């Protein structure tokens, strides 16, 4: 088995219009002139800033992703953005099924699956998010909840297609709360997810799939998380909004890889 590639992905959420995006990305480029080829780096700004991001990251090692897509090709879906539009805009990645979308916009596992499949068809790498709530962890149902999300999100995705999917484990209680899963909790869930992937596909395939962690990752806790054997990178919200901290996270990943 080859070594899995690290992925450091910035999820800007609803922050950063085009001008702010330009400023942040110029700052980031200044701080990270070269990025090790062992680490993939992607920023996911709001839709309206994608064009500016692509323009400012031209000739850099940083790639651009979106935070969502709609699974239909085109048509009367007011407010939605298709996968083909993202490709045309220069996106290589797309976040799918983030817990905020599941919670505030009622995204179901079925919708997450349709979106992930559409991303694969259009050759954009989906970062498929799964993760349990605090209650689910307290009730000790977290492993079952995450197993179920993984299985439903990946329905009808073939054993070759899955190799171009990234899974993000994001415990909801750790998102934007300053509370982080302990390295042991993250590792344990990543191993659990990988064993579900081995059931759905096979061992070799499961060991090739990137599983990244998200939830209050920042320079102060990144090293202990990223050195866990099954943690293949991070999906970073708050700490991706400052060039300094995002650059530092990339450097930490480079030093570990
Ligand atoms: P956070 O967000 O790093 O601000 O906790 C992570 C995410 O929701 O992707």
Image: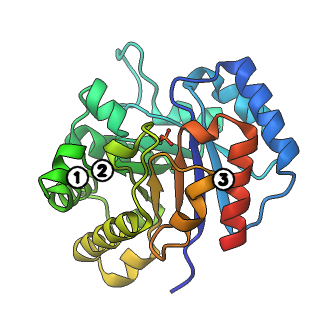
In the shown orientation, is residue 34 left or right of residue 128?
Answer: right
Image location (x, y in percent) of residue 48: 60, 20
Quadrant of residue 27 in the image? top right
In the shown orientation, is residue 58 left or right of residue 255?
Answer: right
In the shown orientation, is residue 2 left or right of residue 230?
Answer: right
What's the residue at 30%, 50% (across, down)? 131
Quadrant of residue 221 in the image? bottom right
Q: Which residue is mark 3?
A: 41
Q: What SS does tag 3 mark?
A: strand
What's the residue at 84%, 57% (across, down)? 34
Which of discs 3 and 2 lies nearer the camera? The answer is: 2
Asked if the residue under mark 2 is in contact with the one under mark 1, i.e. CB atoms within 8 Å, the reply is yes
Which of discs 1 and 2 lies nearer the camera? The answer is: 2
Q: What SS does tag 1 mark?
A: helix
Q: What distance separates the C-alpha of mark 3 from that of mark 1?
A: 25 Å
**Residue 200 visible in this rendered orientation of the protein:** yes
Q: Which numbered disc, 3 or 1, marks the residue that appears first in the sequence?
A: 3
Image location (x, y in percent) of residue 216: 49, 45
User: Which label number is shown at residue 149?
Assistant: 1
User: Which label number is shown at residue 131?
Assistant: 2
Q: What is the basis of the colouring in this image?
A: rainbow
User: Which label number is shown at residue 116?
Assistant: none
Image location (x, y in percent) of residue 26: 83, 34
Q: What SS does tag 2 mark?
A: loop
**Residue 71 visible in this rendered orientation of the protein:** no
Asked if the residue under mark 2 is in contact with the one under mark 3, i.e. CB atoms within 8 Å, the reply is no
Q: What distance separates the C-alpha of mark 1 from that of mark 2?
A: 8 Å
**In-front residue for pair 55/146:** 146
């Amino acid at each position: 088995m080859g070594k899995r590639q690290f992925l450091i992905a910035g999820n800007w959420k609803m922050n950063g219009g085009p001008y702010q995006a330009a400023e942040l990305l110029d700052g980031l480029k200044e701080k990270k002139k070269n990025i090790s080829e062992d680490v993939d780096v992607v920023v996911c700004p709001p839709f309206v800033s994608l064009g500016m991001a692509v323009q400012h990251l031209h000739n850099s090692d940083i790639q651009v992703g979106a935070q969502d897509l709609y699974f239909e090709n085109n048509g009367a879906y007011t407010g939605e953005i298709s996968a083909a539009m993202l490709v045309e805009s220069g996106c290589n990645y797309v976040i799918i099924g983030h817990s905020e979308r599941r919670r505030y916009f009622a995204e179901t596992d079925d919708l997450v699956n349709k979106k992930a499949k559409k991303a694969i068809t259009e050759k954009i790498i989906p970062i498929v998010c799964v993760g349990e709530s605090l209650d689910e962890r307290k009730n000790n149902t977290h492993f079952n909840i995450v197993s179920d999300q993984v299985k439903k999100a990946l329905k009808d995705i073939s054993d070759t297609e899955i190799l171009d999917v990234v899974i993000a484990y994001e415990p909801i209680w750790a998102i934007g709360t300053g509370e982080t899963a302990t390295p042991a909790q993250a590792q344990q869930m990543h191993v659990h997810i990988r064993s579900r992937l081995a059931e759905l596909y096979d061992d070799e395939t499961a060991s090739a799939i990137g599983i990244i962690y998200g939830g209050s990752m920042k320079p102060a806790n990144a090293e202990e998380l990223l050195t866990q054997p099954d943690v293949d990178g991070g999906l970073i919200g708050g700490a991706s909004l400052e060039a300094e901290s995002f650059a530092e996270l990339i450097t930490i990943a480079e030093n570990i890889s």
